[in-house]
Amino acid sequence: MNDVTNQEKNTDISSALAKAQQLLQTGKLQESLLAGQELIKQSPTNIDILYLIAVCQRYLKQPLQSLDTLSKLLSINPSYGRAYQEQGHNLKITASPQEALVAFEQAVKHNPALHASWRELIQLYRLDKNQRGLNLAESEYQRLSKLPKELLTVSSLIQEEKLYQAEKICRLFLKKNKTNVEGMRLLADLGMRQYVYDDAEFLLENCVKFEPDNWLAKHDYVTILHKRQKFEQALQQATELCEKYPGNLAFETSLAGQYVSLGRHESALDIYAKVIEKNPQLEMPHLMVGHALKTIGRVEEGIHAYKNAYKARPDFGDAYWSLANLKTYHFTDEEIDKMKTFIEQASTALADKFHMCFALGKAYEDRKDYQQSFQFYEQGNQLKKSQLRYSADVVDDALKKQSQICNQAFFDKTQGYGSSRKDPIFIVGLPRVGSTLLEQILASHSQVDGTMELPNIIALAHKLNGRRMHNEESLYPQILTELSNEQFIQFADDFIRETQCFRQDAPYFIDKMPNNFRHIGLIHTMFPNAKIIDARRHPMACCFSGFKQLFADGQEFTCGLEEVARYYKGYVALMDHWDKVLPGRVLRVHYEHVVDDLETQVRRILDYCELPFEEACLSFHETERSVRTPSSEQVRQPIYKGGLEQWKNFEPYLDTLKEHLGDMIDSYPLPK
């Protein structure tokens, strides 16, 4: 009932906001402002209402009030480009040209499609005698000026993550302009953002055919080929770009990225070295070098590269976090003081702040100052969460739907479906539970290739879900009940083909994407003979370890103690469901049992996988291979028990976790 009431309330607010916006567009400024001020009482954090109020205030010649409204808006959403643009317009009146310039720079940083901001920057860069900035502003202004009005709107909406509106306008435009390359490119961008990779690839392939010299389309084509794991094709396209536009930084780093994906790290490092030689002041190439070196185990060199990254830009949060994420690096007093100073500075970008918060959390944890450590982990999560649109209720519903749809009747109906292949070994669970350790153990076997966290199953689920509005009913997993055996076999064949580039010569390979636990119904129906291992860890240890880990993407549930506890409970409930409807299908491996008795668990895992025992699996830390997860350094060391109960150091601050996990804590099967 509450959900219906909230939905009705949101619909009423949206309708009233649309009317207020119409008043603004027709020049009825005072009426629009009053309508906005009434609406904000009902929805105090609605950024669209705050933006409307700020625009009205500026047009009514109330720049100080407008700046105050924009300050509130940006405290809610620090990456809203249009708010910075409004800020710039107001600052031109009330402050120095330099302050206005900074605001417009922030505007185009967060939304490069803001035509008016580039126009203002042209004037301000001329005043500032900044030729490099002027050249960029003029180039972007001219490029955007050539775009049809509809596509300019689409570009801006994409930057504001209003994807449904953007797609609607873009498709309408392309109906009348079927071969417009920029329209196709923007529609492909929308496809990539919604994980509809096959559509995006088709569109960009045609863009490149229609306009072979369109470097924007070609660069996007490299990106989608990379996302589709067609690394050889991506490498070829990236090579062509570099040959045609020698010295282009973006193209050269993209080329290096393709080499990294193909495991040709030395080739990538050679390119990065040349880029850095010409552009030592840029932080990102140094960071990429650090990542590549870490992946292949050259940690000391990686540390040096990460330090070069923060020397190039002292407030570069990702460099500090990358050092912390090695798990073996210890920060100096000087580094800690610098990070704390940058976090307090208003000029430090939000992303840099939360990266440094997580780094400081690790720094103080290493120093056994657990109170300060927790404070920084908590602050980092709060800052990160402010960027997200995560809803625990939506995720809970998605997990429950898996149980409701992929029930006993579904599996009875689909018995005998799918491919007979046994190649994949899926390791599922939550992050930070020891899945990388299990992968390293199995990858040490002569018949098993280790790969990475493969996105293919999740991408397939997104594809089956289709494109829809945020509030529309999901198609997946319901659509699974409508698919034929031939379709599931085709999905399996596509999976094998698309993941071939990660394999060597072994008959089996590992996919350790943790969130695949949500899709075991799909996986089982595609590969009824493939092995599935559930990596599990003590709920307090698992949840807190996720909370203090800064993930690049895909693990938004870790940004709050309540959220991560709810997700853990949903995960356990869904795994219980799989056990019930597919008895014996999944092997559960507890991290604590592996640490307590490695050989017994290794033999158990190998028996389940129908693999003969090999001693190399016990000395897994000696296996040389690329590892791309936060545990990369830990799995290069022998088993140690010191990390089992690290969460207890933070126990005084984890009441929220305990409250939401409840009796799961005491019922967890620790080794005796």
Image (spheres, grey):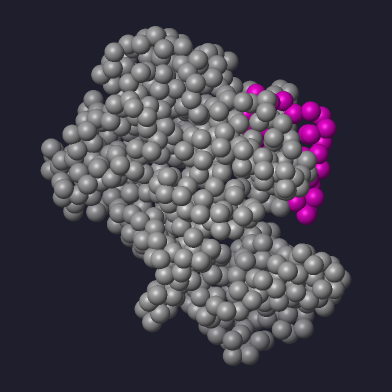
Q: Residue at x 51, y 29 (%)?
A: 627
Where residue 249 sits in the image (x, y, percent)? 64, 53
Where residue 626 sits in the image (x, y, percent)? 50, 28
Name the image quarter holding residue 39.
bottom right
Does 340 lie within the magenta span?
A: yes
Q: Residue at x 35, y 24 (%)?
A: 448
Left or right? Give the position of 87 relative to 187: right
Q: Which residues are magenta?
A: 321-348
Left or right? Give the position of 67 relative to 223: right
Q: Residue at x 65, y 81 (%)?
A: 33
Quadrant in which the C terminus is drawn: top left
Quadrant in which the N terminus is drawn: bottom left
Front residue of this view, candidates 339 and 316: 316
- Regarding residue 628, the answer to whether it shows in the image is yes
Does 524 lie within the magenta span?
A: no
Where residue 668 sits in the image (x, y, percent)? 42, 22
Q: Number of callouts in the render?
A: 0
Q: Is residue 144 above or below residue 440?
A: below
Where residue 631 sits in the image (x, y, percent)? 54, 27
Q: Residue at x 25, y 46 (%)?
A: 491
Left or right? Give the position of 16 relative to 107: left
**Residue at the front extreme, as displayed:** 243
- Regarding residue 42, the answer to whether it shows in the image is no
Name the image quarter holding residue 179.
bottom left
Front residue of this view, candidates 10 and 379: 379
Q: Is residue 542 above or below residue 289?
A: above
